[in-house]
Image (tube, rainbow, N blue to C red):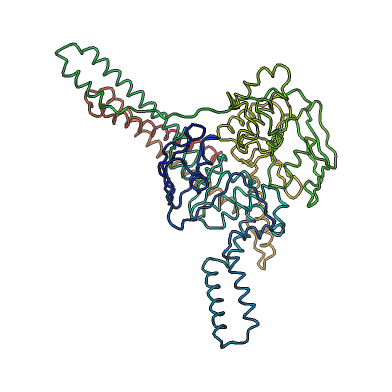
Amino acid sequence: MVSINNLSIQFGGESLFDHVSFIINDKDRIGLVGKNGAGKSTLLKIIKGLQKADEGDIITPESYSIGYLPQEMETQSERTVIEEAMNAFSEVVLLEGRIAAFEKEIGIRTDYESDSYQHLIRKHSEAIERYHLIGGQAVHVNIEKVLTGLGFEREEFDRIMSTFSSGWQMRVEIAKILLQQHDVILLDEPTNHLDIDSIQWLEEFLAGFKGAVVLVSHDRAFLDNVTKRSIEISLGKIYDYKANYSEYVLMREERMESQLATHNNQQRQIKQIERFVERFRSKATKAKQVQSRIKLLEKIDLVEVDLVDESGIRFRFPPAPHSGKIILEGKNICKDYPQKRVLNDLSFSVIKHDRIAFVGKNGEGKSTLSKVITGLVDYTGDLKFGHNVVIGYYAQNQSDYLDPEQTVFKTIDDIAVGDIRTRIKGILGGFLFSGDDIEKKVKVLSGGEKSRLSLAKLLLTPANLLILDEPTNHLDMRSKDVLKSALLQYNGTLIIVSHDRDFLQGLTNRVFEFRHGVIKEYLGDIYDFLEQRRLRTLSELEASQQKAALQSADGEQVSRNKLDWEKRKENEKDIRKVKTQILKCESEIERLEAELKEKEQMLGNPEKHQKQVQDGSLYKLYEEVKNALAREMKRWEELNYELEILEG
């Protein structure tokens, strides 16, 4: 258990945290949420002990182990992948070396009766006992399992770390943290370095992890699948919810609505009492009642409405210039790098208004094909563009294309032309750069700020083919939602490389899966693709089972009719289950409606329930019933929608 007590820290005269406190329990799954700059990464560094707070302290049990993965880090290792992963087990490596040395010496010794020989045998036994005690015999198996889960092929285990990209080197750092069996692990944007397959594997791994997990992520699906508690950081305060991200968003809205309703009701009550006092203050016959009302006013605890940071980017892509029906066609596209062929004889076409997602493991060629289309890398094969195609490109490492010595304003001003130059400050304001911010140099900007500046640059030249390579990296939830909304309204053709399932959902109508140098096309959005691929895998498994059954001695075959019948029975069982839940839901709605009506009647007759009105408990009960009814109505709608799907 880690206890965070009255933590306060200031930056530039502004309070990042103001006496915040909470506890990380032994098996917690916590998501730290909040806009970019709210202090999520800073909080992780303070918990790890890498940064000091102005006030407050972090209390951890003795010998408590905390693992930490920063958002970015320099990796300069010249070890192989497997050696670097083994570096997480320094004691195991040391013991293996000692055991090997002991065994070598034992093999050449002949003085079996001597004290020194017996001492050597004892040392050897003690080393082996310690080795097994700390799980040394399972280390190599666990390392292979974790590295494979994070996307490494077995033949890559002996490659030197420096021959991999920084993203793949960060995967090894993730593997080391997962393997070390810490009491709590702190992960800052771990999915930035992972593809969809690896993210899903990491979700399953963390589900079985025995310690606590605290993570910062802007991947809504990942947060929903991993966390069970959300701690929001907003304007120096924290708000703790026992819920995953999507549930937290709903609960936050309910909290704000409830606070506002209670506040408004209280203000109406106060004004009513004040009017009574003002009206009858001078009447002697009402003096006792007036004094009673004045005392009541003094006793009322004012309900405060929490402030919410509503700042967020706002923009829309400019209208796409007119283009022909065919945007581009590729035939026999190949791209070779010294270590392997990344693109192998690809043929594809992109039609006007297509919205295509490039997905697959890192290193399979998604970014490479994006660069081929934009003309940034050479290739072999034939690539033809249609009439009047204008490309807008956002690179995965877009911040590397920004001049670190330029100011924010100058970065935009250098490429703005015509009337748009008069609107530069307005454009930058839409991306949260205002006041002195526009005079900051690019080199001092955070990752999120550089991403926003790069998006702002993208608006300056209207394009009818947008190619976006991991545009959501470093963007907070609200900024991602704004970007997605802008892309949904964009009237051109879109190619997007992303591993963010929630962001891709509903955004594309075709998916290109990159695997082993070729692409396979799927129709639909990302979840259609994941479902089709799962079904494809199952069908392959079923086919192999049927083949094995045909080859077996008894020649037994799997009956398709039986499988269909079992599927129908399962579906009917699901339908009955949902119908039962709907009936229970309707019964609960009737009960809550009756209770709400009763509370409304009580509110309409305050004299009869004066005590409950004065202490605010009646208003609180009314709001609780009202919110419960809203939740039950929402559940009723969801169940009926589920029933339609099952029956459809």
Task: Work out whether residue 626 can be spotted.
Answer: yes
Q: Residue at x 65, y 50 (%)?
A: 75
In the picture as drawn, the residue positioned furthest to the left comes out as 285
Side of 94 relative to 523 (left or right): left
Q: Position of residue 385 (x, y in %)?
A: 81, 31
Q: Position of residue 511 (x, y in %)?
A: 69, 40
Depth order, front residue of 625/207: 207
Q: Is 144 located above or below residue 610 in the figure? A: below
Q: Residue at x 68, y 25 (%)?
A: 410
Q: Residue at x 64, y 34 (%)?
A: 451
Side of 194 relative to 393 (left or right): left
Q: Residue at x 80, y 43 (%)?
A: 346
Task: Work out whether residue 461 can be spotted.
Answer: no
Q: Is 133 located above or below residue 616 in the figure? A: below
Q: Position of residue 40 (x, y in %)?
A: 52, 40
Q: Position of residue 614 (x, y in %)?
A: 25, 27
Depth order, front residue of 90/193: 90
